[in-house]
Image (cartoon, rainbow, N blue to C red):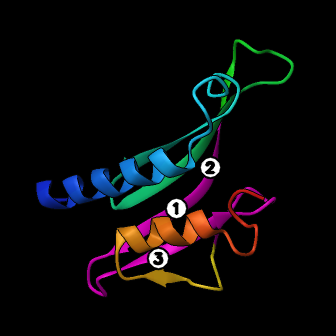
Amino acid sequence: MAFSEFESKKIERAASEFLENRRPPVDIRPKLDIDVRVSGQSVQIVEIRPHFREPSTIIESPVAKATYVKKAQRWKIYWMRSDLKWHLYTPEPESRSIEEFFAIVNGDENGCFFG
C-alpha cells in the first residue's frame, strides 16, 4: 500500500530538507550525489556516482532505508552492511517520524550510513 497524499507530502518535505543539508556542493554532484527514493512503504537514501572504470555508467548504492509499519506507527531503520543486505540499525532501530529518521541518518553517530 502506498502512502496517502498527506504522508507523501510530509515525506517529500522532510527529504527535501535532508537533501538541502546533506548533498555535496553543486560542482561536486556529477561525481558524487545522494537522493531519496520512495517505494511502497519504504523511503531509501541512495548514493549516486559514476563507475570508476566506466564513468558513463552511473552506480547507485543504497545507504539507509526506513520502512513504515502502520500497525505500530513507527519507522523501522535499516543500514546496508558490506554483505549487501539490510540490517536493523541497532542503536536506534525505530523512529516515530520520518523527520526523526532523517535526523538519525544525518547524525550518523556510528558511521554506518556514510562511513
Name the amino acid, label 2: Pro
Q: Nearer the viewer, residue 102 or 50?
A: 102
Q: Which residue is mark 2?
A: 62
Task: Confirm or deny contact between disc 3 and disc 1 (CB under 8 A).
Answer: no
Mark 3 and mark 1: Cα distance apart in space: 8 Å
Judged from the image, the secondary structure of the residue bearing numbered disc 3 is strand
The residue drawn where x is 56% and y is 42% is 23
Which secondary structure, mark 1? strand
Mark 2 in CB contact with mark 3 (< 8 angstroms):
no
Q: Amino acid at mark 1?
A: Lys
Question: Disc 3 designates what residue?
Answer: 76
Rendered residue at 38%/68% (across/down): 99
- Indicate yes or no whether the magenta region holds residue 14: no
Cβ–Cβ under 8 Å for marks 1 and 2: yes
Q: Residue at x 65, y 86 (%)?
A: 91
- Across and down, in percent, residue 35 comes to 50, 41
- Residue 34 location in percent, x, y? 57, 41
- The answer to whether residue 2 of the structure is visible from this angle is no
Q: What residue sits right under mark 1 in the picture?
A: 65
Secondary structure predominantly adopted by residues drawn in magenta: strand
- Count of numbered labels shown in the rendering: 3
Which residue is located at x 86 percent, y 19 percent?
Answer: 53
Task: Classify the position of the N terminus by image quarter.
Answer: bottom left
Work out whether mark 3 precedes mark 1 in sequence or the reverse, and give the earlier one: 1
The question of residue 79 being in magenta is answered with yes
In the image, the segment drawn in magenta is: 60-87
Q: Position of residue 88 (x, y in %)?
A: 61, 77
